Image (cartoon, coloured by chain):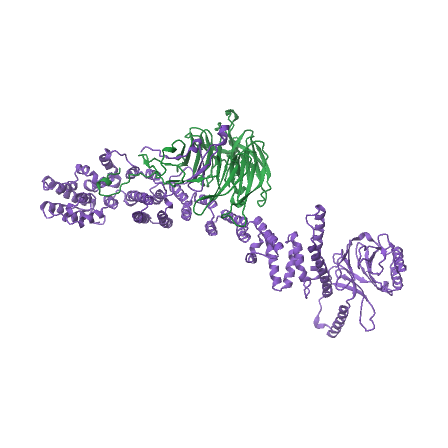
Chain colours: A purple, B green
Amino acid sequence: MAEREKVFCQTIYDPACSAGLQSTWGFGNQLFVFPGRKPTLYPENQLHCRRLQEIREVRWDIDLYHPVMRKLVNESHNIFVMLQKHAAEKAVGGSIHPLILKSSRQYIAVLIAYSDELKKLADATIDEDKKENYLDLLRLLKMSELIWSLCEILFLDSPAGGLVITQLLDWIRIHFTDEETILQILQEERPDCHQFYWDTVYRLVLQGQIDHARRLLSKHTAAYSDNFQSIDDLLKRMPIFSQMSRGHSVAEFDMKWRHWQDDAQRRLEEQEFAGNKQLRTICRILAGEEAVFTELQDICGTWYHMLVSKMLYQHPTVKAIDLQYYVQSCLDVYRNSQQRLGELDNILLVALEFDIHQVIKESSSMFSNWWFVAHLTDLLQHCGQLEAHKLQYGSNLREFLLLDYASSLMSNKSLWVVGVSYLDHCLEFGRHYLENFIENMPIETERKAQKLLNICKERNMTEQARSICKVVGMRHLNNKRLGAALTWFLRSKDVAFATVIAEKFLLEYSESGSFTNLDLIDNLGPSMLLSNRLTFLGKYREFHKLYEDGDFFAAGSLLLSLLDSRLAPKEFWLTLLKDAIPLLEARELIFSSSDTYQLMHCLEELTKEFDVMKQKDGKRRAFSEHEKEKLGLLKLGLTRNLSRAIVTEELFNVYRSDRPPNKNNQSHGGVLIAINKELISTEVSELKTDCEIVWSQINMTGSKNLLIGAYYRPSSNKGTSLQQLELSLSRINQSSNTNIMIGGDFNLGHIDWSIPQVIPGKPDAEHHNKLLELLENFNLQQIVNTPTRKERILDLILVNNPTTVNKVNTLPPLGLSDHDIVYIETDTWLRKVRQHPRKILKYDKANWENIEADLQKTLEELTVMNNNNNSTINEITEGGDLLSLLH
Amino acid sequence: MFVTRHIPTDHQDLIHDVSYDFHGRRMATCSTDQTVQIWDLQDNGEWKCTASWKSHSGSVWRVTWAHPEFGQVIATCSFDRTVSVWEECVGDTGRDGVQSNWIRKTSHVDSRTSIMDVKFAPKHLGLLLATCSADGIVRIYEAPDVMNLSQWSLQHEIMCKISCSCISWNPSRMHAPMIAVGSDDPSPSAGGKCQIYEFNSANRKWNKVESLSVVTDPVHDVAFAPNLGRSHHLLAIASKDLKIISLTPLGRDAALTTQGSKFKMQQVADFSEHESQVWRLSWNVTGTILCSSGDDGCVRLWKANYLGSWKCIAVLKGDGSQVQQMDINQSSMSSSGQGQSNSGVRGPPPVVMNMNIKRNSGWPLFNTQKDQGKAYY
């Protein structure tokens, strides 16, 4: 058959189009067409056309989107899936032929069911356009069914070389039914007077519906005349070949048939029906006379009806494969009419010629949707009628058509799920198509997104799933729904965006002081590990919860770990440190001394950074007044906490010189040096003189030893104290290689340390001069140059080697004191204490009495120490770079 | 069945480009009137213009969408030698009802001539933007931080040495980044008018890998088809005629033997149906149907059958002369034996028309009534 090019053509009438037409694809079968042409191709003066422009949206192949057709699609999908499942199971062993036949029947049943529904709908609608639409679809379904049934008979059902006449008759009967006419005629008072009485009888005979024909004949008024009886007799005796009657072979049937037809011919020749033209016609049909079929061409209506009728009476034992040889004569009968063969005829013709490929090709160009060809091809493929036709790009015809069908479903907003399932059954390209479609699928709602995600998950399409989550997340982000956005970004495991959102949450918190989306943050779980910022957010929220629950210890350690691990962003440290204030002020001691140091470090680091930033660009970030106030509070809290910690923790060797008890026998002050136990330190008692002074020494390998003294001069003292200090200093072996550092409240505030000279006109110049003299004599230098009490520098630190001192600072006072803390840092390398060999005591041999006595003594000592709260503490941290002195 | 629908735009002048977002729910249009319009598909299926603004100081040639993963972002290129990137910022009231705000995030003015085309890279390459200008330079910009669209860096400048008119990214995820550049240089002696560049990740440079010598006429549009698991890439070229070229990457060994050519090139289709210049191409989502627009005022759809041979499956023809004769309400459904039917639609008003294209109207009604039974053969 010559290949015919069928190109669909449509014209759009619009004056603007005269310039040209351009178009862009939409999603699925959707084009946007707009007038115009490539700008560079315009002559200069034509580039402008001052007119409102229009775009046209063009869609096609949308039959399937009709509500009824959608149901059809869904139902046929079930059949399809079932068949694929069974086919896969049966592929191992056993014939799937019955199964295919069953599926085929189901498809036909579905077609019929929805044809009926459409018919009902069409009858019920008044709207002309809608009615037309329904009828359009109805025709489509009827046509599908007709072709499908024939294909089933020829390709699926017939055993090779088997007889097909019975099935063909059924086929004709179903499609050319006239039950209604029969009923109508039967209800008439005189049926034989009905306009179509004889036409109907002929048709029934032509279709081999002998029983119906006899029934109609018997209603004729002359039914009991001889010729009627004769015809009835003939009809009654007509042999029917049925595959059910296994007893008879084909040859046997053939013989019977010939015998019967001879009888019919005989009666015809004997002019038995000479008086009745109609009965004669019937008998001519029965006798299989060629001419009578041509006469009755209008009753057959179509060539294929005639073909079947002819076969029934001329070659009842025809084989499917031989049918094509009888086609031409039938076609010739209809040839003389004006119209040429339609597309439907062509399809049926090629089907009869057993050219399956041509059937599919013709059908796909005739039907405006892929439903028919896709399903039919699938069936044919399964029963092996299509040789595995390997295509250029590695897929077969079945897959090609299924892909097209699925693609047409994908662009509909309710059918796409079905399309996905079809794509699943396309082994070669299905997945690629699906991936592509999923990425382009519009995500209108969360539910749709969820659905798509499930599809991705079932098929292990991580890339696409991620993309979907990201798109949805992005949309929420743009609409400022941070919580929802975060949920989606978490699902897509997108680090960058999760960080961004976590930052936004934190920003929100630092602005408003509260979190939104608490549920989400509280339930982050392990997903918070996705990004550092997110982890911080989660942990920070946890801190708040702990704090609210009153679990201050846990809250404190969490806070510390956040700072310590550098998980917290720098700009958030201030907030965290502020959060620490209430914990520092809590009744119980929450931060240990080392914790406190860490907090102090953080504070220092932060302040430094701010300073640096300030220098860099003047005003970008500076502490606000409020912040400064908070920082002050924080520093106070830290030092207080530190002192509390030091006292409770006993991490220090304490060297002290207490004042003698006053008259009420209460201890009320003295000097004290506290040195971290990690440093090897000893008290140097030989330097002690008759003033409030205490000395200790830290031994250092590879460096000078450090001699530390704490001194207090009562303000009312008349000079003895300074003399005693001089005495004490003179005892130090000047030649010995030591760093000397002595600090304390000298109560001598009238010295300008920058010169250094006594400020003239102030009282008590004698003692001031004495101190300066002392400094000179012992080669000491005073390094504090900020006021420590009000505007005076009372608390001094004297060193012999000022270059080792890095930093001198004052910190806000501790407790009730009116003196600031003096804080210095020095660079000194210290030897760490080695771990001593552990001594394991045998407690069973212990002298328990002595131990008890000892403990008692220690306890007493401790009590004494705790009472001694008006003391000066000198302490050195384990790093060796922190020396703080406070009064 | 074809259904057409009108979308009246407010553009005062010629529309140069209509571009769809990835999901087919939004549309951007640009025009000689220097404006860009954004359209959203409403739930009732109507297109509604949600934003319209003057974007350039010259005709806006092209508009293109970035992948929605990067947010709602479009890029435009214009006669005024700039490329702009725009992002949508939604107000507190949300998108519904309120016109959305599109904010210019950046503007590149590197070119000294009109910028002819702009395309975002496939999303797996990140947020990349390729532009080509009439002075023959392809520029590739990158936004390293997808959260900050105002920072773009000019990553590469490819000197094509020939005036460029169009550009297309190869969407394949499996292959190294690849772009095709078309040139509308009119002189036939200037060599192949379609060049293919590939990114070499070793020396971080774009190298010319092919110059299609079969195309000597000016090229107006190039388009790579979406790759759906095929082993070859399909490139459609709009020139004097429409060509579809398949590029099959060769293995390392094969590349050595064929003297440097990295691809096996095969012209799978060559159509001159437009009988004049073809200037615009567009693939459908799956890369199975190509639509081309040409100087003959027709839009044609092309599809390959299962044997891989390409055919025209439909033609849309614009006719400006017959307006007066057509009756709006009459959809003429004339059918010939070939199953062709021509139907006319014109507006306004926007009429939805259904056209029966393939079905034969003479379908028998299977009735004994003579007249009806005869109606068909």
Q: Image quarter for residue B269?
A: top left
User: From the viewer's perspective, is residue B187 above or below residue A702?
Assistant: above
Left or right position of A251 against B9? left
| Residue A732 % position (x, y) | 87, 59
Q: Quadrant of the C terminus of chain B?
A: top left
Asked if residue A489 shows in the view, the reply is yes
| Residue A421 % position (x, y) | 41, 48
Foreground of the two, A81 or B115: B115
Name the residue furthest bottom: A849
Q: Quadrant of the N terminus of chain B?
A: top left
Q: Image quarter for residue B327?
A: top left
Left or right position of A811 against A66? right
Foreground of the two, A565 or A452: A452
Foreground of the two, B225 or B184: B184
Name the residue furthest right: A766
| Residue A608 % position (x, y) | 72, 51
Left or right position of A602 against B129? right
Asked if residue A87 shows in the view, the reply is no
Foreground of the two, A48 or B167: A48
Residue visible at 62% across and 64% down? A551
| Residue A338 % position (x, y) | 25, 33
User: From the viewer's perspective, is residue A104 above or below residue B347?
Assistant: below
Total numbered labels placed on residues in the image: 0
